[in-house]
Amino acid sequence: MKKTIIRIKSILAAALCGLTAAAAAGCGSVNGSAATINENGDKKLSIVCTGFSEYDWTKNILGEKAADAELTYLLEGGADMHSYQPTAADIAKIATCDVFIYVGGESQEWADDALANSSCRSVKLLDVLAKNGAVKEEEIKEGMQAEEEEHEEEGAPEYDEHVWLTPGNAEIFVRAICDELAAADPSGKDVYTRAADDYIVQLDELKADFASELSACPNRTLIVGDRFPFRYLADEYGLDYYAAFAGCSAETEASFETVAFLSKKLDETGVKTVFTLENSDGKIANAVIANSSEKSADTAALDSLQSVNSEQIKEGASYISIMRKNLEALTAALK
């Protein structure tokens, strides 16, 4: 952890030096390139998002003013939020943008440091949710494998960062992002508000489908041979779960005790599917099945939207389309 912090501090220092040099030289941007200009000759609204969900929500909120904005998705290469480390160029982009949208929490502490030297508006999703009284502390359930390294600061709560993984929260965030875009670009307020309203209708439909389809499922328990970032979703729709690791865990190797516990729960619940996350090798899930009595359960993947890349976006991936695939996987497993 200390090495990571030192590296990020060094990146921040390098980026800030670059900004200072650019300002001294009278440049319009860090790399010497002029600010992006729209067809009317005005500077485009510059927006930077760390995660895919924020990026996709913002793209929808921009509506017909999308051409007048420069929207950047930092993790478009497919890096996971928990392992991502910003480059000097990323830090410089944040320092000079108009609006920066990020989750916050332990995985993105670097963002707070980057913003300390920036005058841009920011939307921190964990804070937005906290203001609505809906933020949750990380949950360690029975059978979960503990982290090898405990946090040095005892007593400090660790919040579950996966706040985007339920349509109800998404609606809260869309409103918050819309407000910040309107504050940064008052001339576009009406456009942003209309587009946000239209998008929230789609989120309402998604939320209603989750409620109706999951309520019709006789089984209510998920067995997950992986991390479990879906606590907000499980709580909202009344699902129980057992998983190998907590949502923000850095562990990847499950102990025999963890596998045996999940195998026992698989037998007890009669569940026929063991879930993994996107891009998982499935080793833990397969081990859980192999150690169960019937050894006949299937595996299925849930997508946490943490590693969506630019190629998937080109192929049409969106927050709503991925969440609908998650709903299909859940209903198939719980029916």
Image (cartoon, rainbow, N blue to C red):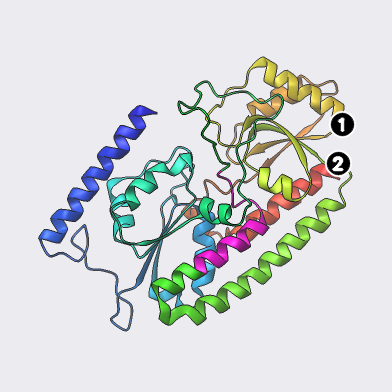
Q: Main secondary structure of the magenta part?
A: helix
Q: Is residue 85 above or below residue 165?
A: above
Residue wearing tag 2: 219
Distance of label 1 from label 2 (alpha carbons): 9 Å
Report the span colored magenta.
161-178
* Left or right relative to 176: residue 283: right
Residue type, label 1:
Gly
How packed mark 1 is, by other alpha carbons closer than 10 Å (few <14, some 14-19, many 20 or more), is few
Q: Looking at the image, which residue is at 79% across and 46% down?
A: 238
Residue wearing tag 1: 270
* Residues at circles 1 and 2 in contact by the CB criterion of under 8 Å: yes
Say which quadrant the N terminus sits in: top left
Magenta stretch encompasses residue 42: no
Q: Is residue 212 above or below residue 10?
A: below
Q: Looking at the image, which residue is at 62% across and 41% down?
A: 229
Question: In x, y percent, where is residue 9?
Answer: 29, 39
Question: In x, y percent, where is residue 312?
Answer: 53, 54
- Give the image quarter of residue 96: bottom left
Q: Nearer the viewer, residue 5 or 250?
A: 5
Residue that sits furthest to the top in the current view = 256
